[in-house]
Amino acid sequence: MLQGTAWTQFPRDSLHAEEPVRQGYTQIHASRREVAAALDAERAWARVALNAIGDAVLAIDLHGTVTFMNRVAESLTGWSETEAIGKPLSRVFHRVDGKTHQTTISPGQRAIEENKKIGLALDCVLVRQDGSKLEIEDSATPIHDREGRVTGAVIVFHDASRSQVILERMAYLAQHDALTGLPNRALLMERLSRAIGLARRHRHLVALLYLDLDAFKPINDSLGHALGDSLLQAVAGRLQDCMRDIDTVCRQGGDEFVILLAEIRKPEDATKVAEKLLHILGKPYRIQGHELLITLSVGISLYPDDAEDADTLMHNADMAMYHTKRNGRNGHQCFTAEMNTLPLQRGRIEPGSHRLLLSSQFFFDF
């Protein structure tokens, strides 16, 4: 009995002695589960974030095997992430030189070998899964573990043709009026300087016509800016229809336009164009349930008769336009040297001209 009692007592005492160990193991396993859960949550968050960005992202391990692709990468390569994971990068991300069409070294491979970020590469073509080709721009960065050892690389790339479209759009907007699509002052001055250079060599004339819509402001204020914008667009369309391909129609700003006649033979050619514009733009405009009638004040300056540089030519055309306003509007006038001796700065004439023009402007509802 004593032996049996001693035998049965031993395990019972041993179990009590091992209880703290079991609790330790339980805590360790719980901690590991918490760490694993935290890592899973972090990976899930990273996946959501990488799928939300606009660039394609592709990750590889040290052996060049694909370990991750976001949705943009799937779209650009033609591979789904399920298909791509575990496959060699050279198969999923087949990259060739845009000029020679020879296979090039992947930026991800270089990032691993050189242990540094590989900057944006240009003139690269991605051969997609279906064999079609896409111009891309790409870069890569090595991945490190906590000890700083390289474990792989991340490649970021995007559609280069889309970038080119954006750049072209930005360049266009920098030189064109957003409302009418006409060249702006910057592009006009560039073309005017070029036209003057050609006229100097070939001995012909250049003309600038400075146009201002009489009493546009009352229409804009009384009927709304949306209607005013539509009227400006309609005016721009008529102006373009009147001009030759070699001429330039510019929206200077507000209700002012400038026309460059790049090559004319005699001064009368410019006055004939001005008369044509007065006739065509004077026809009624039917916009948003209104019939609108507007008139123009036009000033004309000529190279080389009135000025030999672009800025002075523009100033003189502007001055001639304000003399047209002072003399009754709805007409045209050529610049003369005497105009510079009269105090016709904008700040002194414009407020009075608006009050005067407001009384004579009219429009009809229909």
Image (cartoon, rainbow, N blue to C red):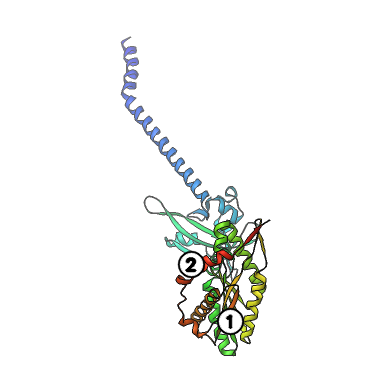
- The residue type indicated by label 2 comes to Pro
Secondary structure found at label 2: helix
User: Quarter of the image containing the N terminus?
Assistant: top left
User: Quarter of the image containing the C terminus?
Assistant: bottom right
Q: Nearer the viewer, residue 33 or 9?
A: 33
Instruction: State the image quarter where residue 158 is shown.
Output: bottom right
Q: Residue at x 53, y 78 (%)?
A: 320
Q: Residue at x 49, y 82 (%)?
A: 339
Q: Nearer the viewer, residue 352 or 232?
A: 352
Is 293 displayed left or right of 253 in the figure? right
In x, y percent, where is residue 311?
49, 79
In x, y percent, where is residue 210?
56, 75
- The residue type indicated by label 1 comes to Ala
In x, y percent, where is residue 157?
53, 59
- Residue with the mark numbered 2: 351
Q: Residue at x 56, y 64 (%)?
A: 359
Q: CA distance from mark 1 to mark 2?
A: 28 Å
Q: With respect to residue 200, does 90 lie above or below?
A: above
Res 48 seen here = yes
Q: Nearer the viewer, residue 363 or 146?
A: 363
Res 224 seen here = no
Q: With respect to residue 242, does 88 lie above or below?
A: above
Q: Residues within 10 Å of mark 1 (few under 14, many from 20)?
A: many
Counting residues from the start of the chain, the first of labels 1 and 2 encountered is 1
- Residue with the mark numbered 1: 207
